[in-house]
Amino acid sequence: MYKRQVFWLSSLAVADGRQAVLGLLFLIVPASLIAIDTMTVDVALAALTACFAWQVKTGRERWVWVTLAAACLVRELSLIHI
């Protein structure tokens, strides 16, 4: 369930010159801990936030807008990305 979220945080860590294993820190984010039990959409929003940070760090400006639009849809319409 958390593969994509850990991937984005790992990619952000690698882009910053750190170890990819730091992506596992996503599992202790409060949104992740709550979503394990209640299946809320906050974990998807947290994943899109990590994706947004990675895209800004790597200079992918076009995809930033897609990520921001997806974040709005996830939060307002409760759409969960798979």
Image: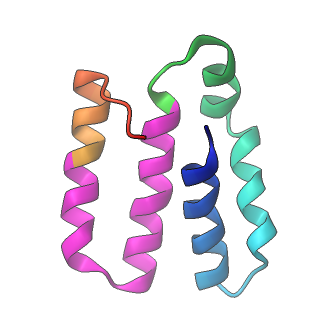
Name the residue at 62% across, 43% down. Answer: 2
Relative to 42, residue 11 above or below = below
Relative to 15, residue 25 above or below = above
Q: Does the magenta portion include 68?
A: yes
Q: Does the magenta portion include 40?
A: no
Which quarter of the image is occupied by the C terminus? top left
The main secondary structure of the magenta stretch is helix
Residue 23, x across and y down, in percent: 71, 61
Name the residue at 55% across, 62% down. Answer: 8
Residue 65, x across and y down, in percent: 19, 62
Relative to 9, residue 25 above or below = above
Left or right of 34? Residue 61 is: left
Name the residue at 42% across, 84% down. Answer: 58
Q: Give the magenta-colored segment's residue range.
A: 43-69
Residue 39, x across and y down, in percent: 55, 18
| Colouring scheme applied when the structure was drawn | rainbow
Which quarter of the image is occupied by the N terminus? top right
